[in-house]
Image (cartoon, rainbow, N blue to C red):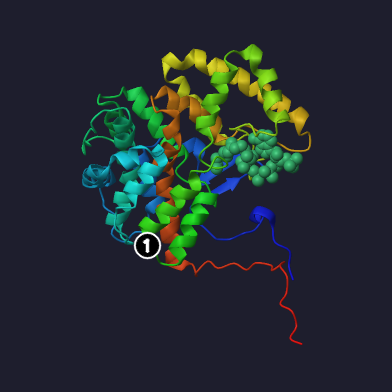
Amino acid sequence: MTAASDGLEGVVAAETVLSEVDGANGVLIVRGRSLDELAGRTTYEDMVGLLFGGFYADLPANIPAALGVARVEVFKEVAALDTGLLDRTPIEAMRALTARLGDGDDAQVAFRLLAAPAVFTAAVIRAQAGEAPVAPDPTLRHAADILRMLRGATASAAEADALDTYLVTVADHGLNASTFAARVVASTRAGLTSAVLAGISALKGPLHGGAPGPVIEMLDEIGEPGNARAWIEGALARGDRLMGFGHRIYKVRDPRADALKAAVRWLDARQGRLEFAEAVEAAALAILREHKPNRALQTNVEFYTALLLEALDFPPSAFTNVFAMGRVAGWLAHAREQLAGGRLIRPASVYVGPMPKKAA
Ligand code: CMC
């Protein structure tokens, strides 16, 4: 009998050409290119091309145009947004609308799924605020259109670039929990929509993609730098975890944190908030070192995600939806990679329950 690995830590469950997370050195590589080469230097559409290349035989030559068309197609499903769904959290409402899309394995299905979190999230946020949905503009870049659908007005170039940087930064990240969930479902040949729904469901938890909303709550409750130590020590004394810190793979600073911090700097109005967040971050790191001297707990992607998405006017209740807008590209690439070469994922367990009584 072999012992189970708690949380599958250290278990190698797939081979992938998509991305590598080097946790010892704080480096993320996506298809041979480091995050430094990608964040702020490439569009989300180019990132989709990078991730999907070789996995979709029918990949459109013009990815921005195909994604624009897909946004328009999925917008029709927004009509199904009823009051029952509007009482749900934005991630639950977005997931329910995404579940209306049919399953399949081709590029057309994949592009609708790429568009779905963006189009549905903007419509849900507006509807929850009592505002009518804004139809997509297929001629715009994905990031610019997301902000336009959210606000009903054109975003500045700096804002669209900042959101593009976010979407690129979070597009893929090794075998994280949501990507693994998507690969498990893809391995059963259930279809891409089913795989993406599994990804959204895993992402929504606070230990994975649900952390940045609570980061804003933490910053708001702390209020000013002088309160940081008392607040953080109180939270740790209660046994709470500090959201935006710690990572299973990174034992040094998560490189995505600084890519996003750089994007926050482009948005001039947020500088005061950024300085405050940096002070809270410094206090948190110092206290985590004192609290857990044997654990290398560093800042992860979610801390500066919170600052960036707040600056772009997304409500904290929908931050995980924006994570899904970027990560969906990774789920779809991994699902196809799994289908192309992988067997059904079916690990073993160790039975530790009672044995049947021997027959008399
Ligand atoms: N605050 C306080 N203590 C922490 C934290 C934290 N943020 N993270 C880990 N620890 C402690 C934990 O209590 C444990 O202590 P002990 O060994 O004494 O019981 C130790 O550090 C190791 O924690 P773990 O739960 O075994 O580590 P893990 O690899 O299972 O968890 C994590 C990784 C990200 C779930 C965890 O660090 C965490 O809960 N962080 C806060 C939530 C968060 O920011 N999530 C976003 C992750 S980044 C987005 C992504 O890529 O998914």
Rendering coords of residue 83 (x, y %) = 30, 39
**Image quarter hosting the N terminus:** bottom right
Rendering coords of residue 265 (x, y %) = 47, 20
Residue situated furthest bottom in the rendering = 360
Residue, x 45% and y 61% (percent of image)? Answer: 185
Residue situated furthest front in the rendering = 360
* SS for dot 1: loop
**In the rendered image, which residue does mark 1 sit on?**
191
Residue, x 55% and y 28% (percent of image)? Answer: 215
Tag 1: amino acid:
Gly
> Quarter-wise, where is residue 350 in the image?
bottom right
Rendering coords of residue 59 (x, y %) = 30, 55
Q: Nearer the viewer, residue 343 or 259?
A: 343
Residue, x 31% and y 60% (percent of image)? Answer: 106
Q: Is residue 215 found left or right of 137 in the rendered image?
A: right
Note whether 287 is above or below 105 in the view shown. Answer: above
Classify 10 Å Cα crowding around label 1: few (below 14), some (14-19), many (20 and above).
many
Q: Is residue 4 found left or right of 18 in the rendered image?
A: right
Note whether 22 is above or below 126 in the view shown. Answer: below
> Quarter-wise, where is residue 162 in the image?
top left
For residue 311, say whether it is visible: yes
